Amino acid sequence: MNITFQTMNTSYRTAVPAQRKYTPASGKTKGDYDTVNISKSRVSQGSDESFARILARKTAAQLSDGASQERVQELKSSIAEGVYQPDSQMIAGRLLGLG
């Protein structure tokens, strides 16, 4: 096996000067870098809080006064007698806001 290497013609390449070493501007010392501080602005915090308040007010307004005293007594007596059979499908639907 005969292997020969040929040198490339480098005359097509243009001379490129070496890059200069970076020197910091006057007044700056090594290690003096820009800094970035990221924080939640007060405007967005206020809007988050106001959104939570609005949501709480709307939810409270949608709630009714609850069950009447007669219904509560009915449920208590049926539970005490052992005849109360809760409807799990209805409960799940109401928890999910379906009915």
Image (cartoon, rainbow, N blue to C red):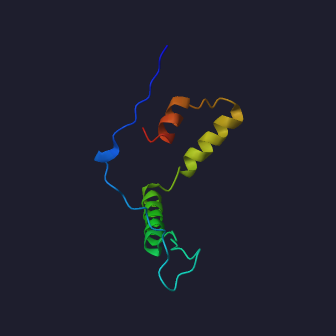
The quarter of the image holding the C terminus is top left
Q: Quadrant of residue 20?
A: bottom left
Residue at (47%, 75%) from the top-left corner?
Answer: 42
The percent position of residue 9, horizontal first and vertical second, equals 33, 40
Q: Quadrant of residue 10?
A: top left
Q: Nearer the viewer, residue 90 or 81?
A: 90
Residue 32 falls left or right of residue 97: right
Residue at (50%, 71%) from the top-left corner?
Answer: 36
Residue at (57%, 51%) from the top-left corner?
Answer: 69
Residue at (67%, 36%) from the top-left corner?
Answer: 79
- The number of callouts visible is 0
The percent position of residue 21, horizontal first and vertical second, equals 49, 68
Residue 9 falls left or right of residue 60: left
Q: State whether residue 46 is above or below residue 8.
A: below
Q: Nearer the viewer, residue 6 or 33?
A: 6
The percent position of residue 4, horizontal first and vertical second, equals 44, 24
Q: State whether residue 32 is above or below residue 49.
A: below
Q: State whether residue 6 is above or below residue 94.
A: above
Q: Nearer the viewer, residue 57 or 6?
A: 6
Residue found at the very far bottom of the displayed protein: 27
Residue 52 falls left or right of residue 81: left
The percent position of residue 6, horizontal first and vertical second, equals 40, 31
